[in-house]
Amino acid sequence: MRCERCLASELGVMVATILASEETAPRRSLMPVLFGGVFVLLAIIALVPLITLLYASVTAGENVLPFEAHGVTLSNYVRTFLDPSLYKMLALTAAFAVGSTALGISIAIFFAWMIERTDVRWRTFFFVAIITPMAIPNMIYALAWTQLLNPNNGLINDAIRGLGLDVTFDVFTLPGMIFVQGLAISSHSFLLIAAAFRTLDPTWEEQSAIAGKGRFETVRRVVLPALKPALLAAVIFFLVVAMETFDIPGTLGMTSHINLLSTQIFWATHPEGGGLPDYGIASTLSVILVAAALILISFYQRQVRHTARFVTITAKGYGTRRIALGEWRTPIFVLALVIILFASVLPIFMLIWRSLISFYVPPSLEALGNVSLAAYGSLFENFDLAGVSANTATVTLVAGIVTVAIASLAAWLILRAPVSASLRRQMQTLAFLPQSVPSIVIGFSLVLVFISAPVAIYGTVWIIAAGMVIKYVAYSTGMMSAAQIQVARELEEASSIAGAGFTRTYRRIVLPLLAPALINCLLWVMIHIVRDLSIALMLYTPDSEVLATKVWTLWENGSVPEAAALGVLTVLVLATLLGAGRLALTMWRRA
Amino acid sequence: MITASDIEKRVENERGQAVQILRGVSFEVPAGTIFTMLGPSGSGKTTTLRCLAGLETMQRGEIKFGERTVFSSARRINLPPDQRRIGMVFQSYAIWPHMSVAENVRYPLDGRGISLNERMERTRRGLAQVGLADLIDRPAPYLSGGQQQRVALARALIDEPEVLLLDEPLSNLDAHLREQMRRELKSLQKRLGVTMVYVTHDQEEALALSDIVAVMRDGRIVEMGAPRDLYDQPQQRFTAEFLGLANFIPGSVERADQRGVIVESVFGRFVAQPRGDVTGPCELFFRPHAARLNAEVSETLGVGEGKVTELSFLGETTDVFIANGEHAVRIRVPAAQAPAVGETVRFSVDPADAAAFAR
């Protein structure tokens, strides 16, 4: 426990600095307490997982728990780096991340360009269709794809064979994983990239045309350079996402034993056949993964700062001038339809189909006779759906509200607290640090903390909620900061001048003005908590299962119809959350 | 009465270096007067105002409202804005968009145990004062710029503060409305007797509105005084230049006599008031309207000569540009008296209206 004591004293020093940092005379007694409290909380959230990992990586052994160990050892690093399979795994991870990001961003750019800048038909339909997969958790998306592209009886492979072609696509391979992850990324990155296209001022292009430059020259010298910062930021961000993700490689690589860094961490702690977990290897691999993510995220944050400076948003007249596609209008329309067929229609259809039949038969009119709701009934009877739902609701609500509360306070403090700029910068660094910690690693580090801690929350839903808070505080602080910046400082200052202290100003001015952003952020966090598999998977026990882990265990145990049925239910829950959010926002705006 | 002594403020820039924003600003504002800080952007005028409000914390100095010390670095006093009992109008007006006009104006009275009836009565009176009695229930987003400005003013005055701070309150209005609001503001101030501190970069606004103007540059007050004195008799070159159109002609001081100093310039010989101890090279300053053309020229005043190169017709008056070599002056004359381009003209300046600044 030596390390925890030095962490505690470090935090003590920080608090003392904060309390003494009032620039002249003490202003308000509440402010130092609030700032100090949030600072310590963010420090715990950011540093405990990292310190625990580092500590475990130099103490744990093959069969030794990290906090039982005596003395420091580098044996885990030696074991890891001398194992030749490490380098193959790193190469696979890199190939997976680069491949899926390239595929996903390319599709997203195509759709963003087509929807924002051309006169293609059905633009609204394409907009809805390309973002639809966001309501499907990645594990469930992967599950749907196993039904489409497994080499034995996948629907697409059957269709190809039906055409008499001797080609089989296998989803349980690296290219298969890249393909599925790429489709998922295309949906997630679309909104970001479309936003970048929307900030392009058409007059820039018109000015270039007037200067005598042709369309190609205009794209090369005006459009692409203007988009580059936003595109680069998106690429780096999704590289990190793909590098750390567990859901798709975990689902598809399970049987074929294709392991990436993230999945290897999971299997080291959950050995097949019930062996002893190797916390030493797991923590060492986690340190490698965090280091890689940290480097990429720091590039990303620099890029985003640069982008913010670069893109001056002039919404005036955007979208007024669309490119007339002419003879390309139909080919591009058809290409977009085909992509939508693969990205949304087939996976959703197959998921529903698989949930309705007990033994797989390809969809056909005759097969409709086999359709039944048996899998849904079985979920209630045999798999405690009520308990799982209650757990999910608890985790989602509690973690969602706690995360948004911390994030909105942190955003205000980072931007407005009456303390020195360097203290606010330190708070910002702490708030955004967890962004670099992959979900699987957050889950694992909490396992390490709580198996050794005297607190009896291991195996409860609360530890899963804690993991979710750690994971989503950074993103939420980013979202709330963006909203807080929109609230002109003078609106708060006017309240101060009018005689209101911090509490009244926050309650009567800041909160009402932030309400739409708060609702948005809460929804975003809740949707991601429901989707999140990796944190829950590391931390759940049979008593604390949530929807995501239940789908996983059903799938792992071969109960495919039940897994698909629960997947369908999860998608419905997410769609309802999205709909409820839209409704809440509209009603709030109308009030 | 507001007393500010020796205010100093530093901030940290993005690279973590300390930047001095205010370098010892001191002034006194007698109760019931209008005090204006005038200067270019970055001169520290808004920062000084925000220090008075308590929105910025300074490193050194003292601020007193009457006998109340609201800030003192020596005595470690720093009252937060909500305890300074002031009113303030922001450049952006800072009207809360989620409230109605009444809710905005009433806000300073809320939460202090005043009955809603009384609060509404005072809100009605306050809005009537700024001519907005009809808009009491209107949601804030449905106000025009001028209306927002009046709501902000009503809100700042509702609690009858001793001190009213205004940060470029007219800069977002169009020219016509600006002039009207300026006059209303002045008459409202005289009626209520509130002490007003006003910040602007518009010299015309400062001259028309203020009892005292402080001209600021680089975090310092360059010069302070009544508008008329500053305009006609600037003691600093920066004041002369910033407060309106000015001619500066290079020359040199020949000698002093009882009317001032004799300045020899490329245009001719003039008599001017010396600013400080001026000998040798100097700049002769006078306003365009202070010079007389041709017929009125009198040898005792000092006379210049040059060729008319350009005329600028302004309606009532015409600006005549007169050049001699590479130097030019601008002289404003009634439109009817304008000479023709190419004509050689003579002009004279009264010694009381001319000043010599050391070069």
Image (cartoon, rainbow, N blue to C red):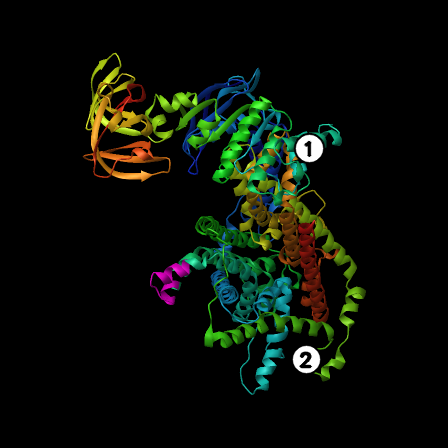
Question: Is residue B103 in view?
Answer: yes
SS for callout 2: loop
Query: What residue does disc 2 label?
Result: A363
Comparing B16 with B89, the one in front is B89
Q: What crowding class fits label 1: few (fewer than 14 Cα within 10 Å), some (14-19), or many (20 or more)? A: many
**Residue A263 on image: x %, y %:** 57, 61
Secondary structure at numbered mark 1: helix
Which kind of residue does numbered mark 2 sit on? Pro
Q: Is residue B138 left or right of residue A237?
A: right
Per the image, is A217 magenta? yes
Residue B88 x/y as whole percent: 57, 30
Q: What amino acid type should be assigned to the residue bearing mark 1?
A: Arg
CB-based contact (under 8 Å), mark 2 and mark 1: no
Residue most extreme to the bottom: A164
**Residues rendered magenta in the picture:** A204-218
Residue displayed at 59% across by 86% down: A162
Q: Is residue A416 above or below residue A534?
A: above
Look at the image and say whether residue A414 sits in the magenta stretch. Answer: no
Pinpoint residue B325: horizontal percent, then vertical percent. Answer: 18, 34
> In the rendered image, is residue A259 in sight?
no
For mark 2, does the 10 Å Cα neighbourhood hold few (<14), some (14 to 19), or many (20 or more) residues?
some
Q: Residue at x 51, y 38 (%)?
A: B177
Q: Is residue A547 left or right of residue B58?
A: right
Which label number is shown at residue B124?
A: 1
Q: Position of residue A352 (x, y in %)?
A: 69, 72
Chain that bears disc 1: B
Magenta span dominant secondary structure: helix
Image quadrant assignment for residue B111:
top right
The mark lying in front, picked from 2 and 1, is 1
Q: Residue furthest right?
A: A381
- Please name the residue shown 34% across and 64% down the image: A213
